Structures are given as C-alpha cells and as structure tokens.
Amino acid sequence: MGRSAAWAVVGALLLAAGTPTAIAQAPASACGARGDVADLIACLKSAYERTDAAGPQDCERRPPALVRPVEGRRVLRFGDRTINGSRSDGTTIESARGTPVSAPAAGIVLFAGEWRSYGTLVIIGAGCGTHVVLAGVGALTVAIGDQVERGERIGSVPAPPTPADLPAIYFEVRRNGAPVDPVEKPQ
C-alpha cells in the first residue's frame, strides 16, 4: 500500500474514532508542534486510540515482550546523565553503519519521520499502554499506520551526522507515559 493510500486509511480510522480533523489528516504534523516526546506520544495515542488498545494479554503481569532493536554496544544506559546534565529516558546503542534496526515489539507504527533534534523517529504503539521510541533510524522501511511484528526490520543504522559522532540508535520505552528501562526484565 502506498503512503497516500495508507494516509487515507489512517485518516478514515481516526475520523471514525472521533479524532480532530487536523490529527486525522496529518497526525505527524498536528502532534509535532507539541512539547517533548512524552507529549508527542500522548497526542499520537489519542489520535490512534483504537489501534493502540490492549489485546487479550494480561497487561499487568505481562507487558509486551521486547527485543533489542539493534546489535551493538550500549554507550548510554537508562538513567545515565547525558552531556547536557539531564537523565536519559532510554539507552543508546552504538552499531556499525548499515546494521539492520528491528522493531523491539509488535504493534502499530504511530510515527515515522523526522522530528526535532531526534532525527528520524519511529514510535510503535505496542498495546498495554506501552510505546517504543527509536531515534536515529535511517532508510526507514515502515510508514505511519503499518502493523509491525517484533523483530521485523524497520530501517538501518545511518552514517553519523558528523565524523565526531558514533553511529548509534536511541531506544526508549514508555509505559502509561512513564519512561522505563528498555532492557529491564518483566517480573
């Protein structure tokens, strides 16, 4: 399905769900004007409420299973201090340019495109209030509204923006809006 056909389907679903017209026609641009990633996810979640509903699984005891999006070395861990002094809400994985990037969880692609200083951003609604955020993904193979399976290729590690930078992917998981360690083991 082409992007324009996908947008038509997504727009129809969103309008049927009673979503405001601006978000239904272009959720990425309507939501992109808002605050930080948490605000973007909240806007997208309201826009895609019907496609982000929890399935029959037991959400409290078994959140969606996750896999690492890319092979490589973690250079920044959840909770570490970043270079600007804030706390990291995710983990950064260094990997070789061209390494495949996979969907860490099955779900619906709620956002796929350029967003602020994140570069290319992908947000997957994985059900049970879980959203997966991947930043810095290159050569995207998914679009907004696509259904992805856990482990399915969604892009690759691009060349770093400057020679001083490392080729890396940022990986963040939010449950009910709050960041959680993306490599934690569910209990």
Image (tube, helix red, strand yellow):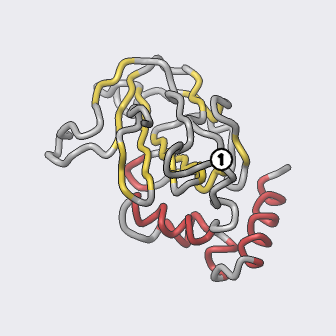
Residue 112 visible somewhere in the drawing: no
Tell me which residue sits at (35%, 35%) in the image.
91
Q: In the picture, residue 39 is in which quadrant?
A: bottom left
Residue type, mark 1 in image: Gly
- In this rendered view, identify the residue nearer to me: 21 or 167: 21
Residue at the left extreme, as displayed: 85
- Mark 1 is surrounded, within 10 Å at the Cα level, by few (under 14), some (14 to 19) or many (20 or more) other residues, namely many
Q: Quadrant of the C terminus?
A: top left
Q: Which corner quadrant of the image does residue 72 belong to?
A: top left
The residue that appears at 81% across and 64% down in the rendered structure is 9
Up the image or down, 134 lies above or below 111; here it is above
Q: Identify residue for label 1.
A: 107
Secondary structure under the numbered disc 1 in the rendered image: strand
Figure check: 110 above or below 160: below
Does residue 91 show up? Answer: yes
**Residue 112 horizontal/vertical position (percent):** 59, 50
> Which image quadrant for residue 155?
top right
Using residue 1 as the reference point, say whether residue 117 is left or right of it: left
Which residue does the image show at 50% across and 51% down from the upper left? Answer: 60
Q: Is residue 44 above or below residue 112?
A: below
The answer to which of 24 and 140 lies nearer the viewer is 24
In-front residue for pair 160/53:
53
Q: Residue at x 45, y 70 (%)?
A: 33
Q: How many marks?
A: 1
Picture coordinates of residue 7 (x, y %)?
A: 76, 62
Q: Residue 162: percent from the left, percent from the top?
A: 35, 30
- Classify 134 as above or below 54: above
Give the percent coordinates (x, y) of residue 153: 66, 30
